[in-house]
Image (cartoon, helix red, strand yellow):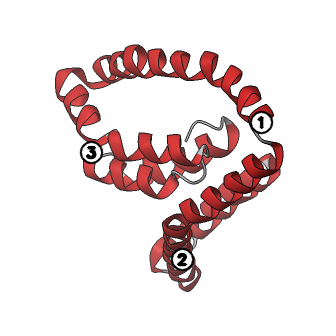
């Protein structure tokens, strides 16, 4: 995945140096980006049905054994995640932008957090993270770079 990211960065610099969004390739890439974001949005709309059917099949096939294996992991993982979200996310926001940043974070964190929790996928949260970043006021060039890279490299979308 890292070579793909490096290629994308170099390609972005090359497109920017040849006219950016106003060049024919820049317009093509912007249109493709819009199409892909719409496609991901459609998939995210129907994904809960597919995941629900998949897990119902797994529980029907493996029964209580599956639930106990996942249950032990969740007893450790979810409380630690909750502590991290409750303690460190507000501290990051306070450190980065003070009380106004903390208020904006608290106002817009719910939808990306619920999406991440429901899908268990940082890639699936990209569209709602992008919307939240736009609403918070994160510059478009920053969110367009940081969100996909963070999702891919650190799995922290």
In screen coordinates, is 68 left or right of 120?
right
Q: Earlier in the sequence, mark 2 or mark 1?
A: 2
Q: CA distance from mark 3 to mark 1?
A: 40 Å
Which numbered disc, 2 or 1, marks the residue closer to the eye?
1
Q: Mark 3–mark 2 contact, CB under 8 Å?
A: no
Please, what secondary structure does the residue beneath circle 2 have? helix
Q: Is residue 126 above or below residue 44?
A: above
- The residues bearing labels 3 and 2 have C-alpha atoms spaced at a distance of 26 Å
In the displayed orientation, state which residue is furthest to the bottom.
24
What number is the disc on residue 66?
1
The residue that mark 2 highlights is: 26
Q: Closer to the camera, 143 or 126? A: 126
**Residue 47, quarter of the rendered image:** bottom right
Establish if 93 lies above or below 25: above
Q: Quadrant of the C terminus?
A: top right
Q: Earlier in the sequence, mark 3 or mark 1?
A: 1
Please tell me which residue is depicted at 67% across the width and 26% down the height of the picture. Answer: 71
Residue at 63% across, 15% down: 76
- Can residue 6 be seen from the camera position used here? no
Where is mark 3, residue-wise? 136
Q: Residues within 10 Å of mark 2 (few under 14, many from 20)?
A: some
Residue 119 appears in the rendering: yes
* Residue 66 in which image quadrant: top right
Residue 72 percent location from the top left of the image: 70, 20
Return the x and y of residue 10 as percentages of the image width and height: 69, 57
- The location of residue 146, given as percent across then percent down, is 52, 44
Closer to the eye: label 3 or 2: 3
């Amino acid at each position: 995945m890292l070579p793909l990211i490096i290629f994308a960065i170099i390609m972005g610099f090359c497109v920017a140096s040849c006219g950016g969004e106003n060049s024919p390739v820049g317009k093509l890439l912007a249109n493709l980006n819009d199409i892909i974001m719409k496609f991901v949005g459609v998939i995210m709309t129907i994904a809960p049905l597919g995941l629900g059917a998949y897990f119902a099949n797994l529980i029907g096939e493996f029964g209580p054994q599956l639930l106990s294996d996942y249950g032990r992991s969740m007893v450790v993982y979810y409380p630690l995640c909750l502590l991290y979200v409750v303690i460190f996310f507000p501290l990051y926001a306070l450190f980065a932008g003070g009380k106004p940043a903390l208020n904006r974070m608290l106002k817009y964190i719910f939808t990306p957090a619920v999406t991440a929790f429901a899908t268990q996928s940082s890639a699936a949260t990209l569209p709602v993270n992008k919307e939240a970043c736009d609403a918070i006021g994160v510059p478009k060039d920053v969110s367009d770079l940081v969100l996909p890279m963070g999702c891919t490299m650190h799995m922290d979308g």
